[in-house]
Image: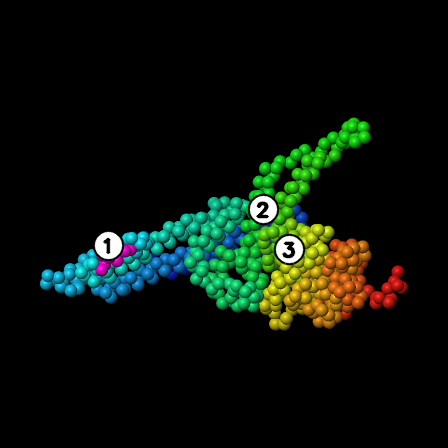
Amino acid sequence: MDLAALKALKPSEYQDAADGYRATSEMAGKAGEALDNRISAGIRNQLSGETAKAALRELKELSKDFHYAEAECALAGAALDGFAFDMAAAKRKLEAALEDAAAAGCTVGADGSVSFPAGGKEVDGKVPEGGTVRVSTSPTDPTAAALECQAVHMHPNPNFGNAVGFADRIGDALKEATEADTKWAPKLRALKADDDLVVSDKDWIDVKSDTAGVRDAGKDYFDSLPQPPKNESPKDNAAWWKGLTDEQRSDYLAVRPDAVGALDGLPATARDQANRTVLDEAHAKARLDYDAWLKKHPEPERFQPYIDPYTGSMPKGLSVESQEWKDWEEARKNARKSLDGMDAIQTRFDATGVNGLPEAYLLGFSTDGDGRAIIANGNPDTADHQAVYVPGTGSELGNIGGGIDRMTKVWHAASDEADGKSVSTITWLGYDAPDSVWKDAPFEHYAYDGAPAFDKFLDGLDTSHTGDTDPHRTVIAHSYGTTLVGAAAQKGHVSADDLVFAGSPGVKVSDADELDVPKGHVWNEEADGDVVPDIGRWGHGGDGFIIPSDPHFGANQMTTDTEGHSGYWDETSHGPSQSLKNQALVVVGKGDDVALKPPPNEWAHVK
């Protein structure tokens, strides 16, 4: 870049362009939200039939277009901010050099050369003449720097040294501007979308690549912004977010959606926006990876003739699944495990409006390890009642659909009992759960390792809530999830008003009063046929291996009409089961209406 171009350049014009892209991004986001949460939700709630299904399919594709435009336009805004930042820095250096040169009596030519006046001690009766130094850059090679320094000291005119310094500074500024232009031009070109209206998986892979490119190119700019707190305190996170300008928030959401989405204490709307971008990128990669796996591992023949193990004969028309196919099918399911979980999250998004189900908020998402996901039905920041569900052994991103379904049922049941107040139910898979009942679940470190994240999440809900009064919060935990909640209360604190345990193998403490909720607000369910509580007590019970199902633990023992370890959220043809309804009543603060088991001394008379 030459001197005239840098002098004429106005970084503010690029910042104005960035504002325009941000405005477009915001409009696209609002349009997509309107499609998903109002138009499509209204169709699901009021219409049925093939025409309605076809309309929903088309609206879903249009929503993808808007979300893609939202992400790419936000990236364009962030890139222009970064470019303007770099060019403004170069221009400030140039302007400072030009001002200093003029103050020293030097003139700068159109090509950047610096002319200096005569000056210094007379030599042979003459004042050393002035001259011109052509534009250059500060030498970085030690030898070159030494030679320049020597030339300055040897020159009889002291103005020569000043001119050399000005020429170097001008050259440095021009070089910096040229490098910024060279660096940013391909990044901005990469943000150009395809000339079709189909947002493909490849497009979302490109978004992730574009994001990394803008983030790397704009390192100096992003480093100049207020940085997120390192202590990860929800209150500090919220204060940091609140202190950013709208432009800075937009740029963070554009280039660091993974970081923003993981910060407890930030508004649910911001976390949801960030995590949906991360989800779409991960979803696209998972689909492409799965398709590549299928191409690399073609399906073998599923059936083979049955061979009688005793006679060696092959009865005509009788076949069985081959072991080769069974092995392939197991590997195939494993290859698409995370994809199944992401599909389940998208299915929940697409269910907004069905039977009045509110919009969903993705409060956390990651594919690291077994994966993480936090999904809310309704906005917890404005809800009167919140319920946070902690799943147990075997929980991972691949089967998150089960947890989402349970909290959807709790939302419906609780809303029916809420007397018009708002309810938000949250599935919290924010820890590494044990993989198997016999191999991993006996160990307590999964609970203690995950407890700090759970405590911090609940504190974040306190911080981000915007209602006039504090929400009533219930924690619902199942199986090993109850052990995590107990560990969280034991080692830290659990910001909740009520605790509901279902199928608990033990919560590490010996008495309900040791848990971090008001006295009388610990509830427990143990269904017929659930063997986990008695099996688990030997590893996770309190003193004397006591667990919440034991009468002397002190929990309110709720009646159950479901069976087994996983039926606590079952529904009947007439509505929620008693097991589910009891949970819903606790969620909305109607503990007095909960159906309880008779006291222990009366159990013998119950048939």
Q: Position of residue 261 (x, y in %)?
A: 56, 58
Q: Position of residue 201 (x, y in %)?
A: 54, 46
- On screen, residue 453 versus residue 198, left or right, reads right
Q: Amino acid at mark 1?
A: Arg
User: Could you tell me what secondary structure mostly forms the magenta stretch?
Assistant: helix
Disc 2 crowd rating (10 Å Cα; few below 14, some 14-19, many 20+) is many
Query: Which of the marked residues, 3 or 2, is nearer the chain's N terminus?
Result: 2
Q: Which quadrant, please, contains the C terminus? A: bottom right
Q: Position of residue 50 (x, y in %)?
A: 65, 46
| Foreground: disc 1 or disc 2 | 1
Question: Which residue is tagged 3?
Answer: 432
Disc 3 vs disc 2: Cβ atoms closer than 8 Å?
no
Q: Amino acid at mark 2?
A: Ala
The magenta-colored residue range is: 145-153
Disc 3 crowd rating (10 Å Cα; few below 14, some 14-19, many 20+) is many
Task: Please tell me the numbered disc located at residue 134.
Answer: 1
**Mark-to-mark CA distance, 1 and 2:** 56 Å
Q: Amino acid at mark 3?
A: Asp
| Foreground: disc 1 or disc 3 | 3
How many marks overall? 3
| Foreground: disc 3 or disc 2 | 3
Task: Please tell me the numbered disc located at residue 286.
Answer: 2
Residue drawn at x 45%, y 53% is 216
**Mark-to-mark CA distance, 3 and 2:** 20 Å
Residue drawn at x 39%, y 51% is 183
Task: Please tell me the numbered disc located at residue 343.
Answer: none
Disc 1 crowd rating (10 Å Cα; few below 14, some 14-19, many 20+) is some
Residue drawn at x 22%, y 56% is 151
